[in-house]
Image: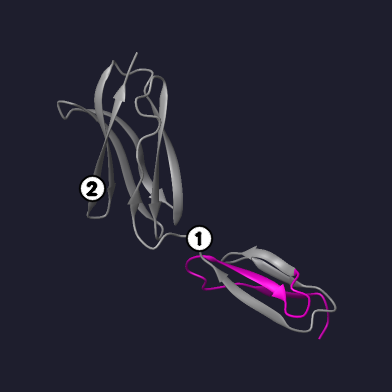
């Protein structure tokens, strides 16, 4: 074999790989995703490959923070795999006020900002839609 060895990762659907030297435990590549290149330096005789999947096991919609809010707030969603998520703000009468996000989200956690500075004081609902899951999180805007 001629070092350094160069390998390409293919077919890794979710998560990442961590590759370390089996003898001294040092990391050869800290995290490798699909279609990345792995470079194995000279002197490495045996490798340990560990799957590192930081993605949650199920969908989770966090709370709106801070609540009450004046200018801006955030909501965090967690998805187990790349999927479409829609995040919207409705007023107390059920009227759509803002669409915060409508599109793909990679596996893991995503925090989005709600611009509350343009909203009058009152009660609002942040609706998070992921597949067949719909969650409404109430929050208050105080001006």
Task: Give x and y (percent) for residue 8.
Answer: 64, 72
Image-based side of 86 in relation to 25, left or right: left
Image-based side of 141 in relation to 4, left or right: left
Q: Residue at x 18, y 26 (%)?
A: 92
The image shows residue 89, relative to residue 49, as above or below, that is above
The image shows residue 73, relative to residue 29, as above or below, that is above
Q: Residue at x 59, y 66 (%)?
A: 35
Label 2 vs label 1: CA separation? 23 Å
Q: Residue at x 83, y 82 (%)?
A: 2
Please report contact status of discs 2 and 1: CB closer than 8 Å, yes or no: no
Q: Quick one: 115 or 34, which is closer to the camera?
A: 115
Mark nearer the N terminus (2 vs 1): 1
Question: What residue does disc 1 label?
Answer: 54
Q: Secondary structure at mark 2?
A: strand
- Which stretch appears magenta? 1-26
Q: Quick one: 25 or 79, which is closer to the camera?
A: 25
Name the main secondary structure of what is drawn in magenta.
loop
Crowding near the residue tagged with mark 1, few <14, some 14–19, many ≥20 C-alpha atoms within 10 Å: few
Question: What residue does disc 2 label?
Answer: 134
Name of the residue lying farthest toward the bottom: 1
Q: Is residue 6 magenta?
A: yes
Task: Give x and y (percent) for residue 68.
Answer: 34, 25
């Amino acid at each position: 074999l001629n070092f350094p060895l160069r390998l390409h990762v293919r077919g890794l659907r979710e998560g990442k790989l961590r590759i370390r030297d089996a003898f001294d435990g040092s990391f050869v590549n800290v995290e490798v995703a699909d279609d990345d290149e792995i470079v194995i330096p000279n002197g490495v005789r045996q490798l340990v490959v560990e799957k590192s999947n930081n993605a949650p096991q199920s969908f989770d919609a966090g709370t709106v923070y801070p609540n009450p809010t004046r200018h801006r707030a955030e909501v965090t969603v967690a998805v187990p795999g790349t999927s479409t998520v829609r995040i919207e703000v409705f007023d107390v009468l059920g009227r759509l006020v803002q669409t915060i996000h409508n599109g793909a989200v990679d596996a893991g956690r995503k925090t989005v900002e709600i611009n509350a500075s343009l909203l009058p004081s009152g009660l609002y609902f942040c609706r998070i839609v992921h597949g067949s899951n719909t969650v409404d999180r109430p929050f208050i805007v105080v001006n």
